[in-house]
Image (cartoon, helix red, strand yellow):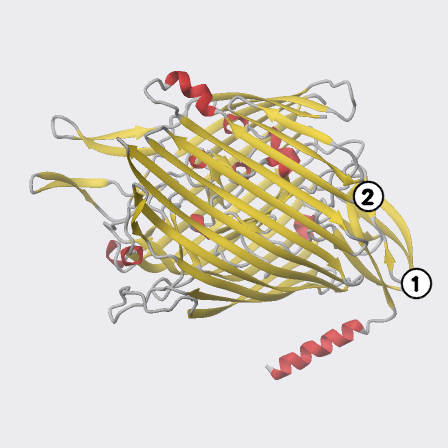
């Protein structure tokens, strides 16, 4: 260990002593709006030296003394070439104008045309939010989560749902961040819409593997969603009017080129449209609303502050029965440039998810309330050591508060599950290193910790929970986990490469669900002396190849994931109203493996992609299925997505997507018997049966309308969901008819669903 530290210090000192060097640094922005360009390219002409901007559009490039031609580029923008003389440190902010001839719309993008081949990222998907409008989706509502589900290794949790599984992991193993704030339930209307209003978003990045060390807390994936800063040049209004929802966004400068603000709101009105068909219900409510807000201001050349937030709520029910749930987040950030090599971001983050329902039965009221509340403080640093090494490091602390469920009867609390508090922490260091023109490495280490606080749960000699033995505010059950991260790229030539990655992730929070599609009342539970943290180890190997001047991109990745301490309900668990839910759980292990294929066409009038996933996901518990391995519910052998976009003319584009997947693993009854005169179903092993295979075709068209002002935009989007009216099974129920025979009834949610949306900007 001592020798390793000495060697690391020697390398660091040697790197710092690398000749007489000077640093070129600054921000890259959109010339029309002032928005920072994330992951844009800064390259030295005629060499392989270069860097990318970070999450805030900042770059730093250190070179020996001399004069250089520097290329500043970003997909969809005109490349700008500047001659820079480096005889001292230079600050150069660059604004790129939109390319005169726009690239054809395509969803999957990268910083450079061959970046998918050359960078160290493996198992990563990036969405260009502005391109989502041409992908046909349910009810015409642009949705980043549903578009993500069209990529290999990412599958929808159910018909129409915005919930998803990544590489055989459970739904709770996906860390979803909105401006760094965790979103615990990313669904509206029981999953048919996501909480992400695309008008408010700038960048979406999904890590399926090779997860960087700055992220922690989930076992399978990270989805990092960034909101737009707002136009710093002029005021704008944009939005859309659809069949069941409308949205509007207002943005503009607080002070021109100094600060900006953006406010985006959305609301559905399905209950208003459905009211004529619901005469038996009084004051029926079925809607959601959400509001995104973000403001930023430059305090000087080296400091900038941000404040952003999200408020969203779903309301469903009548005067007799009501059900609501929602998220709230707030992020306050401070960017500071210490010098041309060191950049920092300090964040305070608040996140809340809560739900409740109430029943009014003849004046007798019954209520339930539950939620999870987070307070998060973190600091992240980028240190640009030299052109071949970018070091990131930082720390994070999260204070969790859990309120599992509280029942009240006529405003008097009747039963309350025990409140639980916890502290989760992490420190990390990582390096992006260019070893040679062919080899690039990304490696790091994260140390995470978790402690229960206050009133907790102890266990007896048999491992069962006992009464509380911990005083309020007392720390107990503290655990630590080392989480190494590593990725490597070997460039075979300028058009092809081999990549591999390994990462270990520790997850201390667990979602307990007993439904096939996820429910707002699913329960979040912290690790405890009974519930151990889930540990996931994943390795991935990929081959990446571009053809015909980067017009076509192909990749194939294989992966293997091992899961320790997975959590599930035992057979016959008593769930509803149970204040001792840990006694109903079982703990085991899991494994998932597969291969993912992706072929993209990124240029020309016709663009799109074909993705195919071949996979297996299994679980094992001693108390279930006689201890034998069984298929996880999300196990799908085959998953195919085919997406095509055709630009017929500058004003008209057509699109289509077709999806197919193996049916989910489920447990069906195999027989029946009588107990005390009551008919009871007999079930075989867990998830031993399959739902019917799923497939669907969606069609779309976008017509750009003429406007009086060049800077204004207006378009009509038409879409047809499930164009050939496939009756895909959402659920299958088994009932006994009058003759005593068992009948299976299939429920299909959607037939053909047409929609039209008018989108505008002025």
Q: Residue furthest top?
A: 276
Residue 322 to residue 219: above or below: above
Q: Badge 1, how many Cα within 10 Å: few under 14, some, many 20+?
A: some
Front position in the image: 38 or 112: 38
Residue 448, x across and y down, in percent: 52, 66
Residue 613, x across and y down, in percent: 48, 44
Of the image marks 2 and 1, the number of the one nearer the N terminus: 1
Q: Badge 2, how many Cα within 10 Å: few under 14, some, many 20+?
A: many
Query: Looking at the rendering, in which quadrant would you find the C terminus?
Result: top right
Q: Secondary structure at mark 2?
A: strand
Mark 2, residue position? 95
Q: Residue furthest left?
A: 676
Front position in the image: 522 or 533: 522
- Residue 128 visible in rendering: no
Image check: 342 left or right of 307?
right
Q: What residue appears at the point 34 percent right and 57 percent down from the top-left corner?
A: 418
Residue 614, x across and y down, in percent: 46, 45
Residue 90, picture quadrant: bottom right
Q: What residue appears at the point 34 percent right and 37 percent down from the top-left corner?
A: 358
Query: Looking at the rendering, in which quadrant would you find the N terminus?
Result: bottom right
Q: Secondary structure at mark 1?
A: loop
Q: Are marks 2 and 1 in contact (CB under 8 Å)?
A: no
Label 2 and label 1: CA atoms lie apart by 23 Å
Mark 1, residue position? 87
Q: What residue appears at the point 87 percent right and 61 percent down from the top-left corner?
A: 89
Residue 751, x across and y down, in percent: 41, 23
- Residue 152 visible in rendering: yes
Residue 442, picture quadrant: bottom right
Residue 608 to residue 86: above or below: above
Q: What residue appears at the point 36 percent right and 69 percent down from the top-left corner?
A: 470
Front position in the image: 554 or 368: 368
């Amino acid at each position: 260990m001592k020798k390793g530290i000495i060697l690391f210090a020697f390398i660091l000192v040697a790197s710092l002593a690398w000749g007489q060097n000077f640093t070129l640094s600054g921000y890259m922005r959109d010339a029309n709006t002032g928005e920072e360009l994330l992951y844009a390219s800064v390259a030295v002409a005629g060499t392989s030296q270069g860097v990318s901007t970070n999450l805030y559009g900042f770059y730093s490039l250190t070179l020996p003394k001399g004069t250089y031609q520097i290329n500043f580029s970003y997909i969809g923008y005109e490349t700008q070439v500047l001659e820079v003389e480096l005889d001292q440190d230079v600050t150069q902010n660059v604004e790129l104008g939109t390319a005169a001839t726009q690239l054809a719309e395509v969803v999957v993008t990268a910083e450079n045309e061959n970046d998918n081949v050359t960078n160290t990222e493996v198992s990563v998907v990036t969405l260009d939010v502005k391109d989502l409008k041409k992908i046909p989706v349910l009810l015409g509502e642009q949705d980043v989560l549903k578009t993500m589900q069209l990529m290999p290794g990412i599958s929808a949790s159910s018909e129409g749902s915005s919930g998803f599984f990544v590489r055989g992991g459970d739904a709770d193993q996906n860390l979803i961040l909105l401006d760094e704030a965790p979103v615990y339930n990313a669904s509206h209307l029981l999953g048919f819409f996501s909480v992400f209003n695309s008008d408010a978003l700038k960048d979406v990045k999904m890590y399926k593997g090779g997860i960087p060390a700055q992220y922690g807390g989930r076992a399978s994936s990270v989805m990092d969603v960034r909101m737009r800063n707002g136009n710093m040049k002029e005021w704008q209004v944009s939005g859309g009017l659809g069949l069941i929802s409308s949205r509007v966004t207002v943005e503009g400068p607080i002070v021109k080129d100094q600060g900006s603000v953006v406010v985006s709101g959305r609301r559905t009105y399905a209950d208003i449209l459905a009211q004529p068909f619901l005469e038996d219900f009084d004051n029926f409510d079925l809607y959601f609303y959400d509001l995104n807000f973000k403001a930023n201001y430059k305090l000087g050349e080296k400091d900038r502050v941000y404040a952003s937030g999200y408020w969203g709520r779903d309301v469903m029910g009548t005067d007799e029965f009501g059900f609501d749930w929602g998220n709230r987040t707030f992020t306050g950030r401070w960017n500071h440039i210490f010098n041309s090599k060191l950049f920092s971001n300090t964040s305070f983050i608040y996140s809340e998810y809560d739900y409740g329902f109430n029943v009014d039965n003849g004046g007798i009221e019954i209520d339930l309330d539950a939620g999870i509340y987070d307070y998060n403080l973190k600091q992240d640093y980028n240190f640009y050591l030299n052109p071949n090494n970018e070091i990131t490091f930082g720390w994070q602390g999260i204070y969790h508060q859990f309120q599992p469920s509280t029942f009240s009867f006529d405003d008097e609390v009747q039963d309350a599950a025990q409140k639980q508090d916890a502290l989760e922490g992490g420190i990390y260091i990582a390096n992006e290193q260019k070893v040679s023109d062919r080899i690039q490495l990304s490696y790091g280490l994260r140390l995470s910790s978790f402690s229960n606080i206050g009133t907790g749960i102890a266990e007896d000699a048999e491992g069962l929970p006992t009464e509380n033995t911990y005083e309020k505010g007392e720390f107990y059950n503290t655990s630590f986990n080392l989480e190494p991260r590593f990725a490597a790229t070997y460039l075979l030539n300028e058009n092809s490469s081999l990549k591999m990655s390994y990462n270990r992730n520790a997850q201390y929070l667990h979602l307990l669900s007993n439904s096939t599609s996820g429910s707002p009342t699913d329960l979040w539970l912290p690790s405890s002396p009974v519930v151990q943290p889930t540990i996931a180890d994943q390795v991935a190997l990929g081959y990446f190849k571009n053809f015909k001047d980067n017009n076509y991109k192909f990749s194939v990745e294989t992966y293997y994931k091992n899961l320790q301490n997975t959590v599930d309900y035992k057979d016959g668990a008593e769930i509803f109203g149970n204040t001792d839910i840990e006694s109903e759980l079982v703990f085991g292990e899991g494994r998932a493996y597969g291969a993912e294929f992706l072929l993209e066409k990124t240029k020309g009038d016709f663009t799109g992609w074909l993705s195919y996933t071949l996979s297996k996901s299994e679980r094992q518990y001693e108390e279930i299925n006689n201890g034998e391995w069984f298929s996880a519910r999300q196990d799908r052998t085959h998953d195919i997505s085919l997406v095509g976009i055709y630009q017929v003319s500058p004003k008209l584009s057509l699109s289509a997507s077709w999806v197919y997947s193996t049916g989910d693993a489920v447990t069906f009854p195999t027989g029946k018997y009588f107990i005390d005169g009551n008919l009871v179903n007999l079930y075989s092993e867990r998830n031993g049966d399959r739902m019917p295979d799923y497939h669907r075709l969606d069609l779309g068209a976008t017509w750009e309308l003429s406007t009086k002002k060049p800077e204004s935009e207006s378009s009509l989007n038409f879409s047809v969901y499930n164009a050939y009216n496939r009756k895909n099974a959402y659920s299958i129920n088994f009932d006994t008819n009058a003759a005593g025979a068992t009948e299976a009834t299939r429920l299909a949610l959607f037939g053909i669903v047409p929609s039209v949306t008018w989108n505008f900007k002025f």
